[in-house]
Amino acid sequence: MSLAWPDIVGSLGVATIVITYVLLQTGSLRSSQLAYSVLNGAGASLVLISLSYSFNFPSFVVESFWLLISLFGVGKYLLKK
């Protein structure tokens, strides 16, 4: 089995989201930090890119909301500063 580049991009996105969650749970990252929303948004974006090559509607919905919520978090952080 060989992985196409969309699979690699999507896997990097999933890894980014999972690592971000691990950092949150271990106390290395706070949800109020800009990096938290940026990393989640980047991960969701990478997964969405991969979904444009192998579409899956439920995954698209989850990742779209994940990206929108992350963008909301970035906006909230920037308005606070």
Image: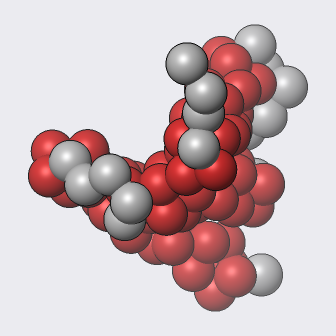
- Answer with left or right where residue 38 lies relative to residue 67: right
The residue at the far bottom in this view is 79
* Residue positioned 59% across, 44% down in the render: 4
Name the colour scheme: secondary structure
The quarter of the picture where residue 13 lies is: top right
Q: Nearer the viewer, residue 27 or 50?
A: 50
Q: Does any portion of residue 14 appear in the rendered image? A: yes
Image: 74 above or below 16 = below
* Residue positioned 14% across, 52% down in the render: 57
- Answer with left or right where residue 81 lies relative to residue 46: right
Residue 40 on image: x %, y %? 59, 50
Image: 14 above or below 34 = above
Q: Does any portion of residue 17 appear in the rendered image? A: no
Q: Nearer the viewer, residue 30 or 43?
A: 43
* Residue positioned 37% across, 65% down in the render: 52
Image: 40 above or below 3 = below
The residue at the far left in this view is 57
Quarter placement of the C terminus: bottom right
The residue at the far right in this view is 28
The residue at the far front in this view is 1
Quarter placement of the N terminus: top right
Residue 26 on image: x %, y %? 75, 13
The quarter of the picture where residue 53 lies is: bottom left
* Residue positioned 47% across, 54% down in the render: 50
Residue 49 on image: x %, y %? 49, 63
Residue 55 on image: x %, y %? 25, 54
